Image (cartoon, grey):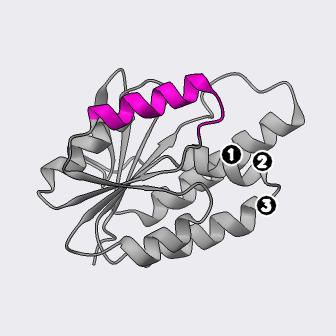
């Protein structure tokens, strides 16, 4: 049976969150928005407020910056759809708390592999730009890239969003690429 997870990746301001929200709405199921962002400053609080205003009253919201595995275990079910926005901020939160990113990523992957219902994960594609000029940024980029790959392997569907346009990556459409 195909994993009920859908990974939606894209660059900053690519339209990935809006696309993920439309996917959740189209499911016809009750919707739970899992927000991983913490309001560290006024600009971030304004962004969060705008996102909350944009979602209608048909969304329940769970704010969880660290224990995403626990949220998935408690909340994922066949009778609702979860939207996790986003894995990038979740990983950043873990890094700021000096958590073991590899261990936490493995725990998340195990939870995604065991999903009990549909879940849309939003994540930034961070590896398409310049090589960061410092060790911390490179470490984060590498950890995020590995997490996206691992979650992408597990989820039944993967969509890349660029300029607001979704591109289905998995399942593959068309012929297999071979040499």
Does residue 49 belong to the magenta stretch?
yes
Q: CA distance from mark 1 to mark 3?
A: 10 Å
Q: Earlier in the sequence, mark 1 or mark 3?
A: 1
Q: Is residue 44 above or below residue 77?
A: above
Q: Secondary structure at mark 2?
A: helix
Whole-percent x, y for residue 7 in the image: 40, 52
Q: Secondary structure at mark 1?
A: helix
Q: Which residue is mark 1?
A: 92
Q: CA distance from mark 3 to mark 2?
A: 8 Å
Quadrant where the N terminus sits is bottom left
Q: Can you tell which mark lies on residue 147?
A: none
Q: In this view, which residue lies farthest toward the right?
A: 135
Q: Can you tell which mark lies on residue 96?
A: 2
CB atoms of marks 3 and 2 within 8 Å: no
> Is residue 149 found left or right of 117 in the rendered image?
right
Residue 22 visible from this viewpoint:
yes
Identify which residue is drawn at 59% across, 28% down. 128
């Amino acid at each position: 049976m195909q994993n009920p997870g859908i990974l939606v990746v894209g660059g900053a301001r690519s339209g990935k969150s809006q696309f993920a929200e439309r996917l959740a709405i189209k499911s016809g199921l009750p919707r739970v928005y899992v927000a991983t962002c913490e309001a560290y400053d006024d600009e971030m609080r304004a962004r969060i407020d705008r996102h909350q205003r944009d979602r209608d009253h048909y969304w329940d919201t769970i704010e969880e910056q660290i224990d995403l595995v626990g949220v998935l275990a408690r909340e994922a079910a066949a009778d609702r759809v979860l939207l996790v926005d986003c894995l990038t901020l979740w990983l950043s939160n873990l890094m700021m708390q000096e958590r073991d990113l590899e261990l936490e990523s493995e725990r998340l992957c195990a939870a995604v592999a065991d999903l009990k219902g549909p879940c849309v994960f939003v994540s930034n594609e961070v590896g398409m730009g310049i090589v960061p000029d410092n060790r911390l940024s490179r470490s984060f980029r590498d950890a995020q890239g590995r997490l996206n790959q691992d979650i992408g392997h597990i989820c039944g569907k993967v969509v890349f969003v660029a300029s607001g346009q979704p591109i289905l990556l998995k399942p593959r459409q068309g012929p297999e690429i071979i040499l």
